[in-house]
Image (cartoon, helix red, strand yellow):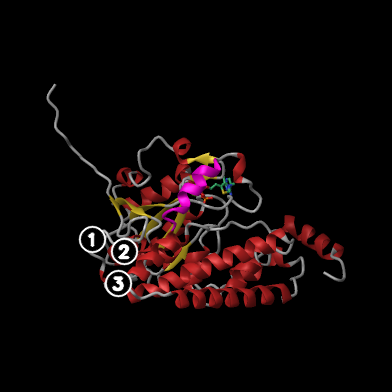
Amino acid sequence: MPSDRVAAFSVELTRYLDTDGHKLGPMPEFAANPVDLVPLYQAMVLTRAFDAKAVALQRTGRLGTFASSLGQEAVGVGAASAMAVDDVLVPSFRDQAAQLWRGVTPVELLLYWGGDERGSNFAVPRADFPISVPVGSHVPHAAGVALAMKLRHEARAALCIIGDGATSKGDFYEALNVAGVWHLPLVILICNNQWSISVPRSAQSAAQTLAQKAIAAGIPGEQMDGNDVIAVRACTERALAHARAGGGASLIEVLTYRLSDHTTADDARRYRDDAEVSAHWHGEPVARLRQYLVSQGVWSRDDEEQALARAAAVIDRAAEEYLATPPQPVSAMFDYLFAELPASLAAQRAQAVAEEPDDA
Ligand SMILES: Cc1ncc(C[n+]2csc(CCOP(=O)(O)OP(=O)(O)O)c2C)c(N)n1
Ligand SMILES: [Mg+2]
């Protein structure tokens, strides 16, 4: 039977720096002068210092369960640095790099992970969404944000970050579909760190790439090297500009690797080989950009020492402030969640308040 090809698709993978920090071709405009990349490097160093401190606080019983972004710093810094101030970030639970860039403070993040509702009441990016832990459930929220922007004829866009595992959820597919058919100003960034707790990418989906999920929604989809902060920023910048200009939604899959345990409640040695993890230290985002900056003569050993000391000082100060913050009363968990408390919970609230120890 004769047949006509009615559609054809391909998925491209882009990187600007190889795993040793060598430039692979012409740079995007923001990276034309290597010195302009220094703030991105410093932000990745700050995130790494934050993660190390948060894990240490959890290990000493002073923080709740925490999800480190070790090895994934380029994803958040690259994506957030591509955003305009009045774009809206809709993050998941491993996106502290993006949040810190946006102006969420390390104290707010520690309060959040310490179970204090004030940690989600950001002083600076007021319109950014709080951390979302239920996997994939924030993608429809991001589509709603983008729909509101469109209805108000605002030249803004929403950026939603999700994991590779989240792309198996119905919430993701439904949001992707409306983003396509309603031409929403939305960029969905899949942070493919190769693992969803103990489920490897190979067991997550039979699709060759996660970026190709865009095809069924009728929107552009591409892959970027997620350990190359230049690549992440370049593609996010392009996709956000397209969205703000009325061009509709995009899906970006960035390829990275979770060097840490899933969270502090996990021991990844139970399900993955040390050899796999060691191999992925080669090409990690911080060393990769540092090698490039050094090769361009804009970063020295002194600069490195100063950057590490500065990051440690900022994070130490934040930890002290967090630890010195008196806890909220037990009623806070009810009062922050509901504008009007349902009757069924009013009794629980009253009981919790009545049973609260005096020294709480
Ligand atoms: C709806 C829902 N189901 C299960 C969980 C438990 N859980 C927390 S993180 C996670 C895996 C997420 O994997 P991925 O989307 O790849 O993100 P990553 O943790 O790798 O950043 C699961 C199953 C949850 N938080 N929410
Ligand atoms: Mg994952």
Q: Which amino acid does the dot numbered 1 rest on?
A: Gly
Q: Residue furthest front?
A: 301
Does 290 appear above or below 275?
A: below
Give coordinates of residue 336: x percent, y percent. 66, 67
Is residue 148 in sight in this rendering?
A: no
Residue 107, by quadrant, is: bottom right
Residue under numbered circle 3: 30
Residue under numbered circle 2: 234
- Horizontal arrangement in the rendering, residue 181 relative to residue 47 (left or right): left
Residue under numbered circle 1: 25
Residue 108, by quadrant, is: bottom right
Magenta run includes residue 277:
yes
Q: Residue furthest top?
A: 1
Determine if the C-beta at disc 2 is less than 8 A from ligand 1: no
Does 317 appear above or below 278?
A: below
The answer to which of marks 2 and 3 sits earlier in the sequence is 3
Q: Which amino acid does the dot numbered 3 rest on?
A: Phe
Determine if the C-beta at disc 1 is less than 8 A from ligand 2: no
Does 65 appear above or below 307?
A: above
Is disc 1 placed on a helix, strand or loop?
loop
Give coordinates of residue 292: x percent, y percent. 35, 66
Measured Cα–Cα span from mark 2 to mark 3: 8 Å
Residue at 29% in and 66% down: 241
Q: Which amino acid does the dot numbered 2 rest on?
A: Ala
Q: Which residues are magenta?
A: 273-284
What numbered label is drawn on residue 302? none
